[in-house]
Amino acid sequence: MSKNDNIEIITGDPKKAIVKLAIPMMISMLLIMMYNIADSIWVAGLGADALAAIGFITPLFMVLVGLGNGIGAGANSLIARNIGAKNYKQANNSGLHAILLSVIVSVIFTILIEGFMVPILQFMGAGDTIQYAMDYSYIIFGFLFIFVYSGVASAIFRSEGDMKRSTIAIAITAVLNIILDPIFIYILNLGIAGAAWATVISATMSCVIMSYWIWSKKDLYLDLSLKNFDYQTSLMVDTLQVAIPSTLENIVFSALAIIINSMLVLAAGTTAVAVYTASMRIVQLAMIPLIGLGTAVLTVAGVAYGAHNYKNLKTAHSYSIKVGFLISIILGAIMFVFSSPIATIFSYTAASASLSPQIATAISVLSLFVLAIPHGIMSSMMFQGVGKGTYSLLITLLRSLILETVFAYLFCFTFGWGLTGIYAGVVFGCFVGGTIGYVWAKLFIRRFKQIAIRKYAPQEN
């Protein structure tokens, strides 16, 4: 497939574009989740404390990944809108500005996170697991640029519809990480630090491969040669209008995880964090198709918005939600029916065997979470695609930090439902918040249609 074929796909039928973009993205996300799960599975062999440490670091790691994904989302949106508007020069310049941002942000946040790691972990209540958490986190956060740049480079490929090579790079990363995990953790006897080194080395390979395609092979639709760089503050601001809210969304998810972890500790101790961490790995695995669809919507919505094509924007939003619910019903049912066998994956050693029944219960309840999220996530990604990152952030704040937290607290402590109440509260809050986001997105598309007809239809006639 040529680079122009990719452009024809994202500017054509939105339904076909979403399918063609989403499937490779699903594969990419599946591979990423596989090596995240591999980390948990191999670390679980070190005992409940080590697994709980991963649970405490995961929210911070989400912030780390969110930095790259946030800038990547901003670049994806801006590049796609320029492609839709047929402004090739600005599309190139937008990609180069995103890479510059990745360097600046990485340096700043590496210093901040590394400097305040211990008090952050103490604030999160890491307790007896803090040494495990420190051994893992100092390595991961010390190589922040690798993860940020990887997220930005992947987004540049996605913005022009080139999902194949983005998927290949991630596939190599995932397979390498899965291979290196047991070697570094057990054979080299590095313990939890070995898992961190395996992740860093694997991510570095992804960066090397994508950099080769961008600057050595030079067969992208975009031309990211330095000669095309023309610093424009407006491009930095436009990228940040999506990047900052998108990054803050990941911080919101991290804050939610910290709050939920605190509730779990209050309700049943640090073992409950290990149980929740393991069960959420499965939930995140089931959410991969939804994230893949959402990422496809971001690109297709950006192109449609840049071309002032309200019909394609409406179709992309509605179609992705329908497909999302269909997939969620199937995966939610599988999680519920096979909750017990799935739980045994995280309890294969004597040190973690006692967690199996609790993990199975958590997976059973949280299977409903997969059903509660499609309409909300597609609406958020549509807003990011059209450059309205703040709208997406507000939806996430309402859904996650407010509603999920409030209902989890009410169901657990006020209603006395215990751990099950926390799980149920997260599910119910997600559904209510997503519904509000869906209504908002529909109103936005309707208003965009009115503006497009009034401003552009007369010119086309």
Image: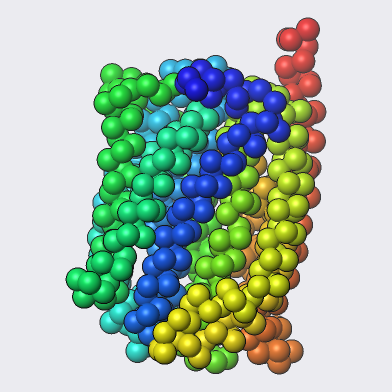
Residue 433 is left or right of residue 95, and the answer is right
Count of number-bearing discs: 0
* Residue at figure coordinates x 71%, y 92% from the top left: 416
Residue 138 visible: no
Nearer the observer, 244 or 182 = 182
Nearer the observer, 120 or 203 = 203
Residue 193 is left or right of residue 266, and the answer is left
Q: Position of residue 75 (x, y in %)?
A: 46, 36
Q: Is residue 74 above or below residue 306?
A: below
Nearer the observer, 302 or 180 = 180
* Residue at figure coordinates x 57%, y 81% from the top left: 359
* Residue at figure coordinates x 48%, y 88% from the top left: 353
Q: Give the position of the C terminus as an image quadrant.
A: top right
Q: Position of residue 234 (x, y in %)?
A: 44, 30
Q: Position of residue 2 (x, y in %)?
A: 48, 19
Q: Position of residue 41 (x, y in %)?
A: 42, 72
Q: Quadrant of residue 442?
A: top right
In the image, farthest residue toward the left: 188
Q: Is residue 395 above or below residue 346?
A: above
What colour scheme was applied to this rendering of the protein?
Answer: rainbow
In the image, farthest residue toward the top: 461
Residue 59 visible: yes
Q: Is residue 39 above or below residue 226?
A: below
Q: Quadrant of residue 136?
A: bottom left
* Residue at figure coordinates x 56%, y 62% from the top left: 284
